[in-house]
Image (tube, rainbow, N blue to C red):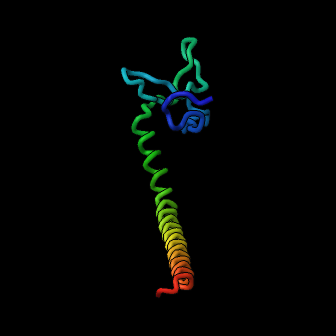
Amino acid sequence: MREGAALLQGLAVCGHCGRRLAVHYSGRFAAPGYHCAGKNIVNGRGEYCLNIGGVQIDAAVAEAFLAALAPAGLEASLQAIEQFDADHETTLAQFRRDVERARYNAQRAERRYRAVDPGE
């Protein structure tokens, strides 16, 4: 299960050793960061290959992701406009049929009325 705000959780790998980066949160607003514990042990502790803040990285990833989706978004917008126009034309055609049906029924009722009333 994914928890936290980091975008690259479980996806990013270390450029030095190739291991997956772990996510940590720090600061008052729990800003994400990425680190690699690495394979070297110094004084009984793992030495980080990499330790970097994630705010700028996540922002760059989000920007690249949205830039990659922009052409598809434009195409989707154009398709939505075409669909809207088609639906609008279909709705107008239905309204026109409803008006024609109402006009026919009114004329038919008038003909029946005139056929019954010999005074006209």
Q: How many marks?
A: 0
Please state the horizontal and vertical placement of residue 78, each as a whole percent of the image: 48, 67
Q: Residue at x 59, y 30 (%)?
A: 2
Q: Which residue is at the far top? A: 44
Query: Is residue 72 depicted above or below 30 in this figure?
Result: below
Q: Which residue is at the far left? A: 28
Q: Quadrant of residue 115?
A: bottom right
Please state the horizontal and vertical placement of residue 118, each as a whole percent of the image: 52, 86
Q: Is residue 19 left or right of residue 32?
A: right
Q: Nearer the viewer, residue 110 or 33?
A: 110
- The answer to whether one can see residue 95 in this image is yes
Q: Residue at x 52, y 61 (%)?
A: 72
Q: Nearer the viewer, residue 8 or 73?
A: 73
Q: Residue at x 49, y 56 (%)?
A: 68
Please state the horizontal and vertical placement of residue 91, each as a whole percent of the image: 52, 69
Q: Residue at x 55, y 77 (%)?
A: 105
Please state the horizontal and vertical placement of residue 101, each as a whole percent of the image: 55, 76
- The answer to whether one can see residue 104 in this image is no
Q: Which residue is at the far front? A: 119
Viewport quadrant of the N terminus = top right
Q: Nearer the viewer, residue 72 or 48?
A: 72
Query: Is residue 33 depicted above or below 80 in this figure?
Result: above
Query: Is residue 65 depicted above or below 107 in this figure?
Result: above
